Image (cartoon, helix red, strand yellow):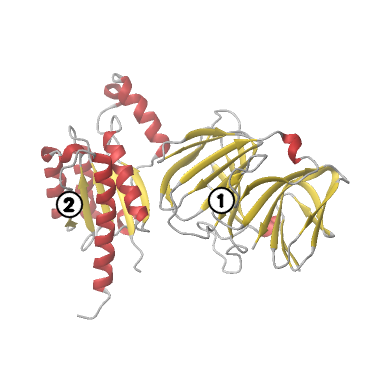
Amino acid sequence: MLTLRRAEDRGHSNLGWLDSYHTFSFGGYSDPKHMGFRALRVLNDDRVAPGKGFGAHGHRDMEILSYVLEGKLAHKDSMGEQHVLGPNEVQAMSAGSGVIHSEFNGSATEATHFLQVWIVPSTPDVEPSYQQFAYDPSEKRGALRLMAGPDRKTTPPSAFIHQDARIYASVLGSGESITHRMAPGRHAWVQCAAGQLNVNGVSLKDGDGLAVSDEAELSLRGEGTKGGELLLFDLA
Amino acid sequence: MADVNVLVVFYSRYGKAEQLALAAGLGAIQTKSNIRLRRVADLADSATIAADPAWKQNLDRMTMDYVVPRAADPAWADVIILATPEDSSAELQRYVGSLPSIGGMDGKIAAPLAPGNNESALKPIYAAAACAGLIVAPAQAPSPDGVASARAYGRRVSLMARALKELQDRPV
């Protein structure tokens, strides 16, 4: 079963410094029909103005991942971590028993465009932790590059999360296609992060998402003149 | 389990009171409370602040990380944690003094904090909070690790608020 969540049907908030689209209910956008999909609770498509950002705030019991599409995202937290994240890097924070952090556009001149993902952990109250790693962009070209999953110390590196979920990124040129086998009982969410894609016959444009259940395989193809970029969530 | 909202309001110049505020906020999160972090504005003028590079540098950073308290914040809160530096409590005292004009403070908990439990810094905050109609939580017992102590304090006062809310919901 394939269920399309169109970009234009998402929640939207514009605070001036932050222009955000919410695939699922978040903050002031609340729709009981869109509270998440399986363990995927939040998928925000955020554009942050130069030098602006999210001031100090708290989280607990959530696996929080940031995937930068353009620009820089500066992060600082109560664990003493202070980093700048860019494209082709992944940041994963396990809020666990509690963290306070802030996130800012790390550039004074350029906007930051990033996707923020919240996954509900399978275990509450874990020790808070922070991970960040870089990869070569060629690793996601025409392939599913694992960003995060339930296995520690993978080769190549990926972030460990406290949930039976695997998150992959991929960039597909126009006409380029790959497949992903779905284990029995697994579900998937495919988010088109840029460009155009086709997933099992359904066309996705930038910001569209597709919920997938009871399918044996995902057939992912780049469409349009430039193809597209995606995040694939393989979920229990 | 009753939902508890904890407002952490602090004044800081060089980061010590801020550190206590963050630790107390983290303690509150650890008890599954919702938190908001706010820094009250300086009373000093900009020339005074500019003449002190360390103050100015911290202020620039804190202005990014925190907004000033809004009128809706204390109304939202069940607990107001108040962290003041040991050498200047006038800023926070003025904030606490403004709370009665917002109204609805009865039964909320105020939880004052200062580095080293500095008595002369805490006393005016205690007095202002009590006069504003808040239930004032006792200070933490002195401890060599101020940050760990502030975290424990944040946990304790948010648990106190939860217990109070749950009691209020019960028939007498």
SS label for mark 1 = loop
Looking at the image, which is closer to me, B34 or A118? A118
Q: Nearest the camera: B146 or A26?
A: B146
The residue at 43%/49% (across/down) is: A127
Relative side of A171 to B121, left or right: right
> Toward the viewer: B108 or A169?
A169
Task: Report if residue A28 is visible in the image.
Answer: yes
Q: Residue furthest right?
A: A175
| Image mark for residue A231 | none
Crowding at dot 2, Cα within 10 Å, few <14 / some 14-19 / many 20+, comes out as many
Image spot of residue A195 (x, y percent): 77, 45
The 10 Å Cα crowd at callout 1, few under 14, some 14 to 19, many 20 or more, is: many
Q: Amino acid at mark 1?
A: Ile
Q: Please provide percent x and percent y for residue B85.
A: 22, 36
> Which residue is found at the position 17% from the left and 58% from the top?
B133
Residue B50 visible, this angle? no
Task: Please give the residue where the numbered disc 1 appears in the rendered image.
Answer: A161
Relative side of A51 to A221, left or right: left
Mark 2: amino acid: Ala
Both marks 2 and 1 on one chain: no
Relative to A32, is A81 above or below? above
Q: Position of residue A231 (x, y in %)?
A: 69, 49
